Amino acid sequence: MYTSKFPTGRSIAAILICALLLGGCGSGQEGADSADNTAARDNLDAMSVEHASDTTQPSAAVQKKSTRKVVSQTMPYTEYNDKLVYGYFAAPADMFEPMPAVIMIHEWWGLNDNIRAMASRLAGEGYIVFAVDLFAGNVASSPEEARQLMLAVIEDPESANRNIMSAFEFVSKTAGAPRVGSLGWCFGGGWSLNAALLLPDELDASVIYYGQVTADEDKLRPLNTPILGLFGAEDRGIKIDTVEAFGTALEHLRKDYEIHIYPGVGHAFANPTGNNYDAASADDAWRRTLEFFEHHLATEAS
C-alpha cells in the first residue's frame, strides 16, 4: 500500500534547493465497488484495442517548449510495499513564492520521459507541476506491458487513491501551493476525474483528456471541482454516448464543467506518446487547458 513520505510545512525555496543540491529530498477516500471495477476492466479492454499497434514514440506535443526556464527534479513522495515511489517535480526557475500546482497523471505507458517533458512544458506556463507515478516505478515499452500495469491499478485502486492523496499533500502542504488542479491523458484522464472525486472540496480544477468517465449521479453529486473534458468524436474506447451521459449528469447536478468533443479525431489525439496525435485538435485542447487553469488556479502571486 502507499503511504505518505513527506513532512509538511516546507517552503518552496527549501524544496527547490533540496532538489537541485541534494538530488531530491524526503523522509525516511476510499473504496471502489464491483461496478467500478467492472467499468475499469471494460475501459482496459477498450484501451488495449485503441493502443494495440501504438508505440512509446514521443508525439509532437513534447517538442513544444515554453520560453520560461524551468527547474526539475525526480523526488520521492510516497511509498508502495515499503519502497519509495518517485514523482517528477517541475517549476519555473524564477519562482520565489508558492505558485498554483497541477498534479499530472501519466497515460497507460507510465511516468516516462514524454510525461516529464509535458510536466516541464506546463511548468513553464507558471505552475508547480508534480507528475505522479501510479505504476510504482514501472514503465511499459509495449501495449501488453502497459495493459498489465494498468490491470494492477484496477485490482488495487485504494493504493492508487492513496498515491493521489500523497501527491496532493505534497503540492499543497510541502510545496505550499495555494490552489491545486489535476490533468491526465487516457488512463491518467480517468484518474484526473478520480482525483476530483477523492478531493471534491479541495481540488480546484480537473482536466480530463479522453479518460474514463461516469454518469452515476450518486458518485458525481459530492463533486465541487470544475471539470474540463476533452474528447475525440471518433474515439472507439471512450465512446461519445458515455461522454454525453457524463455531461448530462453534470448538467443535471448543476456542476461547473466544460466538455469539448473534437470532430474527426480518435483516442489519444493529444497524447505525449503514440501515433494518433492530431496537431490542430491537440493545440486547441492545450489552449483550452491553459485558459481553464488560468481561470480556476490563478492567484495574485502567480
Image: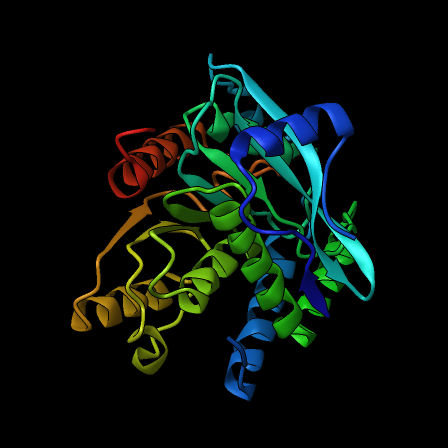
Q: Is residue 60 above or below residue 175?
A: above
Residue positioned most to the right = 82
Give the percent coordinates (x, y) of residue 115.
Answer: 61, 37
Residue positioned most to the top = 67
Q: Relative to 48, is 139 on the left or the right?
A: right
Residue at image point 31% right, 74% down: 222
Q: Is residue 271 above or below residue 125?
A: below
Q: Relative to 234, is 300 on the left or the right?
A: left
Residue 84 visible (yes or no): yes
Give the percent coordinates (x, y) of residue 53.
Answer: 69, 47
Quadrant in the picture for the N terminus = bottom right
Residue positioned most to the bottom = 34
The image quarter containing residue 249 is: bottom left
Give the percent coordinates (x, y) of residue 262.
Answer: 33, 44
The image quarter containing residue 145 is: bottom right
Specify how the rendered protein is coloured. rainbow
Q: Relative to 180, is 91 on the left or the right?
A: right
Residue at image point 49% right, 35% down: 128
Q: Is residue 225 above or below residue 35?
A: above
Residue 56 visible (yes or no): no
Give the percent coordinates (x, y) of residue 44.
Answer: 61, 66
Residue at image point 52% right, 41% down: 175
29 and 238: which is toward the camera: 29
The image quarter containing residue 250 is: bottom left
42 and 224: which is toward the camera: 224
How many marks the image carries: the answer is: 0
